[in-house]
Amino acid sequence: MTKGYWIARIDVRDAEAYKDYVAANGPAFAQFGGRFLVRGGRHEAVMGEARARNVVIEFPSYDDALACWHSDLYQAAKAKQRGGVEAEILVIEGYDGAQPTASEPPPPANPASE
């Protein structure tokens, strides 16, 4: 089964509200099998603009990731932010297909898809 992910880019505007949110979100993530892969940490914007905080949470499936977002438990935790963040959050399906190998030539560039 393909995993699901939350990808979040966050600027915290109200540290106390964000602290309340962080203290409350764990039960929702645990209920849906969420696991932090990235939680803050060093980063460098190599293309485009960055936000101050980046988070990636892995779930057993896309459906679990989406169900967590829509759950009453998570929405109650999210309400504790009280508008104290600016963020983009994606719920996205993982990829289980073939991966590049050193012995394969790269595919030809397609400028129309970039």
Image (cartoon, grey):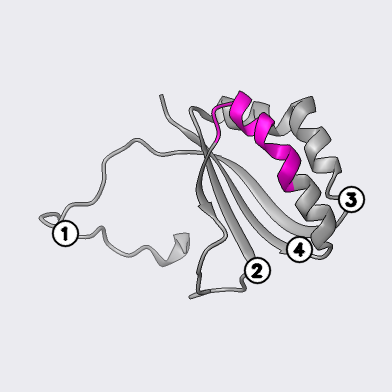
Which mark is on residue 95? Answer: none
Say which element carries label 2.
loop
Mark with earlier residue (1, 3) = 3
In this rendering, is residue 13 above or below 71? below
Q: Are marks 2 and 4 in contact (CB under 8 Å)?
A: yes
- Earlier in the chain: of badge 4 and badge 3, it is 4
Q: Residue at x 74, y 33 (%)?
A: 74
Q: Kindly report the distance in space between the C-alpha atoms of the residues bearing marks 4 and 1.
A: 43 Å
Position of residue 101 measured from the top left corner of the image (x, y, whole percent): 17, 52
Identity, as a three-letter code, of the amino acid under mark 1: Pro
Q: Secondary structure at mark 1?
A: loop
First in sequence, mark 4 or 1: give its number: 4
Q: Which mark is residue 105?
A: 1
What's the CA distance linking mark 1 and mark 3?
A: 50 Å
Q: CA distance from mark 4 to mark 3?
A: 11 Å
Residue visible at 84% across and 62% down?
A: 14
In this view, the residue in front, 16 or 49, is 16
Callout in the foreground (1, 3): 3
Q: Which dot, 1 or 2, sits closer to the camera?
A: 2
- In front: mark 4 or mark 1? 4
Q: Which residues are magenta?
A: 22-34
Neighbour tally class for label 2: few under 14, some 14-19, many 20 plus, Cα within 10 Å = few
- From the image, tell me which residue sits under label 3: 82
* Frontmost residue, 84 versus 46: 84
Asked if disc 4 and disc 3 are in contact, CB closer than 8 Å, the reply is no
Tell me the number on the disc at residue 12: 4
Residue type marked 2:
Ala
What amino acid does circle 3 point to? Arg
Task: Please tell me in which quadrant of the rendered image residue 65 appears.
Answer: top right
